[in-house]
Each structure stands twice: as C-alpha cells, then as structure tokens.
C-alpha cells in the first residue's frame, strides 16, 4: 500500500468509527443506560425589540415628499468641445444630468420623506429636500396625495415645515433625544430611492456628534441604513416616538456605509415652532472666527489643558468687535455655560436671539476677564422659498427666499432698507428676479425687512411691481402673482 493510501485509510478509520459510535450512542439501548453528562447551562435569553409593532403604530404618519424644481441650463459644463447642442448625443448627456447650453429651463424631480406632527397637516422634512422647490407633493401612507406649501425652511439646521390641507391625520409622538443611550435600538421609516414606507433599524452609535460642515446641530449618529430619499423621515425609539429627523450620511459612494446622522427632535421642534409662527428662524451671531484649542495651542497660551474657543478673526462692526473681543482671546464661557470647544460656542450663540445680551468669560494674556456682547442676527436667517402649494404665504406667491441686509451691506449700496434675494423660483423667477437682487419696494411702499415683503405680497392681487436694485441700477419689475 502506498504512503498516501495508508494515510487515507488511517483517516477513514478514525472518522468512520466516530460517526458510527455517534449513531450507536443515539440508537443503542446500551448507550441509553450509560451515565448521562450534566447538561450545559442554558444561555441567557436576550429579548429583541418588537420593531413590527413599532412600524404598525408609526408608519401611517410617515409621508413621501416629491419635489419639482426648475434647472436653468446656462452653459456647457463637462461636455467635450465641439458637441452640437442639437445632436442626439447632447440630448442624451443632458438627460443624465450634465448641464448644457441654450439657457433653457428643465424640470427636475426629487424625492424625500417627512412625518406628520399635527392632525391638521403640518409636516416636518429637511430643508435641503424642499430647497428651490417649484412644487411639493405629499403622498400619505394610505396613498392619498396632496399639494403642499413650504411654511418655512432653515438651512442652518436643515429643518423645514410644510403644510397640506387635510384634517384628522395620524401623527407621531415626540420623544426625548436626551434620554437616548449609545447602543440603544432605533428605527427609520422613509422612502429611500423612492421606495415608500421602507423600514430599517440599527443602534445609536454616538450622540452630540459635530460634522465638519456643520457647527450648530448636535447630530445623533446611528448605523441605521439611510439612503437618498430617507432625508426628512423620522428616527424612532423603541416606544414608537420620534427622536430625530434623518438628515445626512457619510458615504464615499453616495450610498449607505454605516454612518447616518439625524437632527435631534428637540432642536427640530424649536426651529419648527419659529418657522410656523414667523416663516423664518433667527439665529444669533457674534461675528468671530474661532477654532478649538489643541494641546499644542494650550501650551502656547500657557494653559494646563485645552479648553475654550480661540478667536482667530473679529469681523469689522460685528457684535464681537463692539464687545471688545480681539484675535488671540480664548472664550471659556458664555452666560455661565462652559465653552469646551468652538462647536459648543457656535451652538450656544446660534441658539440665542438677536438683541440678547451675553456675558463672555475670556482669557487674554493669561488672565481671565468678563465682556458683555449684544448678539446680532446671522445672515443665514432667511424666509424660506415657499413656492409650492396653495400660496397662502407671501413668499409662496412670489417665490423668493430673502433676508434682511446687514448694516455693512446697506452702507455699501447706499440704502436704508431693502431685502436681499438669496433664492428665487416660481413667479419671481419667471419675471426675471435673480439671487443677489435687492428688493427696495413693492409698488410704491418701501420694504424694510422680510416681514414687510411678506405682508405686502400677501395683500396684493394679480400683479405687483417690485423696485429692484441690481448692481448700480434700480428698476421696477412687474410680477404676476395670481
């Protein structure tokens, strides 16, 4: 017998008897009478969350949000030179999102999610979902569809409130995101890629997470699968209460990679209340550029540990300059609340209202001192583009997103009033209003702030004439508002 055959035989001789013995132990009466080994201790039972009941309870209040916008195709971008705009190749490339010539307007559709917060039709979604919308359509879980109007949108927090004309609607219960624990189960319901009422689940990965492009929202980080179309949908705890609005993902591919971020619902509720009452959110502003302290910076400034926000720049004429802040100051606290880093400072200031007085505890030249600042208004506090739906809001009929001019801007253009157009759609866009225009008056009535514009347009009928300052010229632009 060869060496390989002998090895195979030895292996077979080892395995076959063991299997045969196992069979005999199971079947033979002799084996049955053998002393039994003590059973292993049972593993503890782990109760998994009842996500099915949660979905049954919550899903009727979750909606799909479909948005129509107009893209203005003004230049050939990304196309090889020499392509004829009338050629089939040009049309093919344009259909797949590559912009190209002619200046023509092209409709574009997007999908997001939302959830109902009042029985009479107020709905939360993301500001980026409805930004620049010409028309917003809401589809309920029972398949009914409604045109919606944008009540207000706050880009800083990425929260928007939209409204449909309906009654006796199902709503979600509001939870407490502060009570969430890292590792706790949560679920999301939304319309990823347009697939309505899709449910995904995971755990809370971290709390109060700051993102590189956002210094205001303390995000809830989860590993719940969130994809394009989930934006604006609810993040739910296991009691079926909404604890956040799904807003962002971290991705290298555009799809889910295990890092999802939700706006805490307490932040969203505060913003939503202001949007419902005023159509905008007023965020406070100091007018400084700050950076977080590192160990090396702390040692350079003679500090025992890194804390506070280091002021690197103070804007001319800003509340910070008026309060006496200087580059190199370290802000350690504000109104008795410790400032751990630049993110903390940004959140505290943004949450204050313009006109509030704040006491700053700072470190300058190795000594602490107190300064008092009067908080200003952030230029990001805008009236939302409410171009969709029934048009009851003034900006909805006009189709502009505007903000008040800062003192420096008014001085630069030589005007004492007016509002700056930041976004434009609908009737205003058709009339030729552009971002960057300053609206000085409606007909012959001077516009001082966004509330003035809203009131004037709300009371108008048919047409309005907007006095617009563009560059160094002033011109009346007629707008048909219906």
Image (cartoon, rainbow, N blue to C red):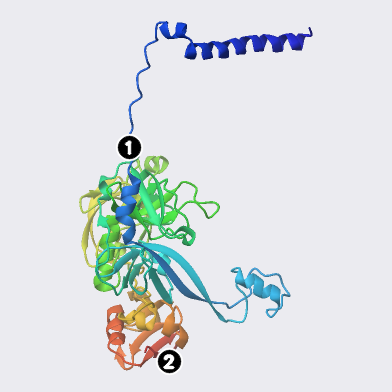
Whole-percent x, y for residue 71 in the image? 52, 75
| Residue closer to the observer: 165 or 206 | 165
Q: Which numbered disc covers residue 384?
A: none
| Residue 297 position (above or below residue 142) | above
Query: SS of the residue at dot 1?
Result: loop
**How many numbered badges does the structure rendering display?**
2
Residue 146 visible to the viewer: yes
Mark 2 is surrounded, within 10 Å at the Cα level, by few (under 14), some (14 to 19) or many (20 or more) other residues, namely few
Name the residue carrying label 2.
475
Q: CA distance from mark 2 to mark 1?
A: 60 Å
Q: Quadrant of residue 44?
A: top left
Residue drawn at x 65%, y 75% as measured from the top left: 91
Whole-percent x, y for residue 109 in the image? 49, 71
- Location of the N terminus by quadrant is top right
Q: Which numbered disc covers residue 304?
A: 1
Query: SS of the residue at dot 2?
Result: strand
Q: Is residue 336 left or right of residue 418?
A: left
Q: Earlier in the sequence, mark 2 or mark 1?
A: 1
Whole-percent x, y for residue 188 in the image? 38, 52
Whole-percent x, y for residue 157 in the image? 35, 61
| Residue 13 position (above or below residue 325) | above
């Amino acid at each position: 017998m060869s060496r390989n055959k002998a090895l195979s035989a030895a292996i077979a001789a080892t395995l076959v008897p063991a299997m045969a013995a196992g069979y005999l132990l199971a079947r033979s009466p002799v084996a049955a009478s053998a002393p039994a080994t003590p059973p292993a201790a049972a593993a503890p039972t782990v109760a998994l969350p009842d996500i099915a009941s949660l979905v049954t309870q919550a899903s009727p209040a979750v909606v799909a949000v479909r948005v129509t916008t107009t893209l203005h195709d003004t230049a050939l971008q990304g196309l090889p030179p020499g392509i004829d705009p009338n050629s089939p190749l040009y049309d093919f490339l344009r259909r797949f999102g590559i912009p190209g010539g002619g200046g023509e307007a092209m409709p574009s559709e997007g999908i997001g999610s939302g959830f109902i917060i009042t029985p009479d039709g107020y709905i939360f979604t993301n500001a980026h979902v409805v930004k620049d919308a010409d028309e917003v359509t809401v589809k309920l879980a029972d398949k009914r569809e409604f045109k919606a109007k944008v009540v207000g949108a706050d880009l800083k927090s990425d929260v928007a409130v939209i409204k449909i004309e309906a009654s006796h609607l199902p709503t979600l219960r509001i939870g407490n995101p502060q009570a969430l624990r890292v590792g706790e189960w949560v679920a999301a319901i939304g319309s990823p890629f347009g697939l309505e009422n899709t449910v995904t689940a995971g755990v809370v990965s971290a709390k109060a997470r700051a993102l590189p492009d956002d210094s205001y929202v303390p995000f809830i980080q989860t590993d719940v699968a969130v994809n394009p179309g989930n934006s604006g949908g609810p993040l739910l705890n296991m009691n079926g209460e909404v604890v956040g609005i799904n807003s962002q993902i971290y991705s290298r591919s555009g799809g889910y990679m295990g890092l999802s971020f939700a706006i805490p619902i307490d932040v969203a509720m505060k913003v939503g209340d202001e949007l419902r009452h005023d159509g905008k959110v007023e965020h406070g502003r100091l007018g400084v550029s700050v950076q977080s302290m590192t160990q090396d910076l702390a040692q350079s400034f003679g500090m025992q540990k890194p804390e506070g926000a280091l002021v690197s720049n103070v804007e001319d004429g800003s509340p910070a300059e008026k309060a006496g802040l200087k580059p190199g100051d370290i802000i350690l606290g504000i109104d008795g609340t410790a400032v751990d880093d630049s993110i903390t400072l940004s959140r505290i200031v943004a949450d204050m209202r313009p006109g509030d007085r704040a006491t700053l505890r700072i470190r300058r030249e190795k000594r602490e001192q107190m300064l008092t600042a009067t908080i200003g208004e952030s230029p990001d506090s805008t009236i939302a583009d409410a171009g969709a739906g029934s048009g009851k809001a003034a900006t909805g009929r006009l189709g502009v997103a505007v903000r008040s001019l800062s003192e420096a801007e008014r001085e630069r253009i030589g005007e004492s009033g007016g509002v700056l157009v930041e976004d434009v759609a609908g009737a205003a866009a058709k009339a030729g209003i552009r971002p960057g225009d300053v609206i000085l008056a409606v007909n012959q009535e001077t516009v001082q702030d966004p509330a003035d514009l809203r009131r004037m347009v709300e009371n108008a009928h048919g047409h309005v004439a907007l006095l617009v300052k563009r560059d160094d010229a002033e011109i009346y632009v007629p707008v048909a508002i219906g």
